[in-house]
Image (cartoon, rainbow, N blue to C red):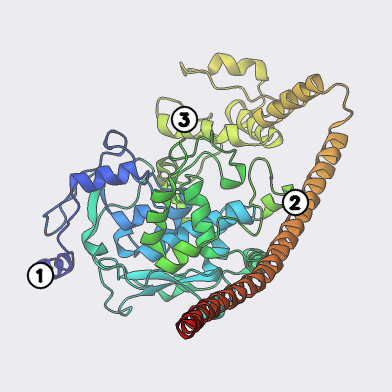
Amino acid sequence: MAEERESFESQWAPSDVTDENLKEMVAHGVLPAKEIIGWRPACGEAFLTPDTHEVVVFSHFLYGGFPLPTSKFFRGIVEFYGISLHHLNPNSIVHIANFIHVCEAFLGIRPHFALFRRIFFLKPQPNKNKPCVVGRGTGFQLRGTLSQKYFSMPFKTSNKGWHANWFYVQNPELALPEYSCLPPTYQDTRNSLPMGDEAAQALSLMERMLKLKEQGLQGEQITRHFIKSRLAPIKERSRTAFEFDGKNDPNREDPESLEFKIMKERMYKIFSNAIAVSCSHLLPVVPYNAFNPPPPEFSLMKSDPPIAQRRSPRRQAGQASGGPKIRSDAQPSISKPTNQSDSRKRKLILSDDEGDNVEKAGNKEVTGKQPRQANPKKKTSSRPIPKIRKSSRIHLRNEAKTATLEKLVPHHGTLEETRAQLHETRELARKTEHDLRDRIAKLQDSNFELSGSSKVQVAKITELEKRIKALEKDKGELTKQRDSALKDIEGICS
């Protein structure tokens, strides 16, 4: 076992990341300050020596949209496929970041795990029987012919030397798995296609993606959009990209606009140089955001990684104690305080009817046929049991919002009329946008025609200039002939 461990550790290249390199990454806005995330360089280390609360990160990952702490969706992917961060390669990180941003900013939904499984599969390298430990061990690739249907991703043909660009960062609470020197364990079942309702949703979303591609949306434009917006799709965020409200959005990595030079350098690290230079600054479609929200029905498209739910320590504690307990009031609070606390939390999540039914059942088990008035006297617990209200918090919050709206807009009719007006305004804005795009296209065509005619004029002027020079030359020769003739005549006369 020790020899096998040494064999796996020998696959690591010595780190060449210095403190200056990490400070440069902070200046580029891809790495938080040392005081925030607790990074430390590993320059010169031949093999990894991470502390208990540290994780190994490659610098190329951060330029591709990887931050810490990671989102629930990313953690779910890592756990579902049974891999660690260092098993992936830079292109896989960009694939995941682009997928999340496509779902949020261009499909108007939260990241859809069934759609991810429909598009990508995990490929072990060099083979599933003996995968590598570092980087080349696994990678997400497009299934079958989806390379023709999914957005183009013209990655660099070589990321030479990226295996040595590793360093350490603190592993926050919403964390990645601890470091392991072992290679990934491959299972064919994890690459299976989604089934049932989620599969139907994935196919529907694939059709919408295909329409976006037909309208001209490209993979490098998606990457450029989240880089320019200073967003990190893989990061744990309080808002999605379709709730992004501009420069003051709390999820921006930096409130300041990104310099074009730095943005170009980040694009060069991901895509081929020709693509990075020619990448259009204008998107062919309008992304969703706080000012252009997606339709409400899009929120019905949901699919989360199943294993991501198991990361909560509270859930694990509840399962270890014999499964979820809806109510434990009949048990003394002194004997099992953990279960009682857990059951109280679970009780507050119930709906009003379920809470009432459980309360009645609990009273019957404790008191039999005794009246309810005797119950409070028999309670020996020093901590009072929270009383379940008839109205849930969400219901009260909605009522408060409705009352506030009625005060703010008393003369604008009902909420439905206001929504209808907003819908009409949005449609008018979209039509205006299409008209403007048509005008721009016409102007570009007219400019092209003008440029063509101007080229013809330039050619004519050049030809005339050549003729003028030839005439001036002939004139000079005739002048010389005239002068010589005059001299001959003067000689004859003398």
Q: Say which quadrant the N terminus sits in.
A: bottom left
Identify residue type, mark 1: Glu
**Disc sitting over residue 479 in the figure:** none
Q: Judge depth for marks 3 and 1 and give the one in front.
A: 1
Whole-Å distance between the Cαs marked 3 and 1?
Answer: 48 Å
Mark earlier in primary sequence (3, 1): 1
Residue extending farthest to the front is: 494
Mark earlier in primary sequence (2, 1): 1
Residue 120 percent location from the top left of the image: 49, 70
Q: Judge depth for marks 2 and 1 and give the one in front.
A: 2
Location of mark 3 (residue): 341
Question: Left or right: 219 with respect to 88?
Answer: right
Q: Residues within 10 Å of mark 2 (few under 14, many from 20)?
A: few
Label 3: which secondary element: helix
Q: Do the numbered discs 2 and 3 sit on residues whose CB atoms are within 8 Å? A: no
**Disc sitting over residue 433 in the figure:** 2
Query: In this rendering, does residue 60 appear at all?
Result: yes
Quadrant housing residue 157: bottom left
Label 2: which secondary element: helix
Mark earlier in primary sequence (2, 3): 3
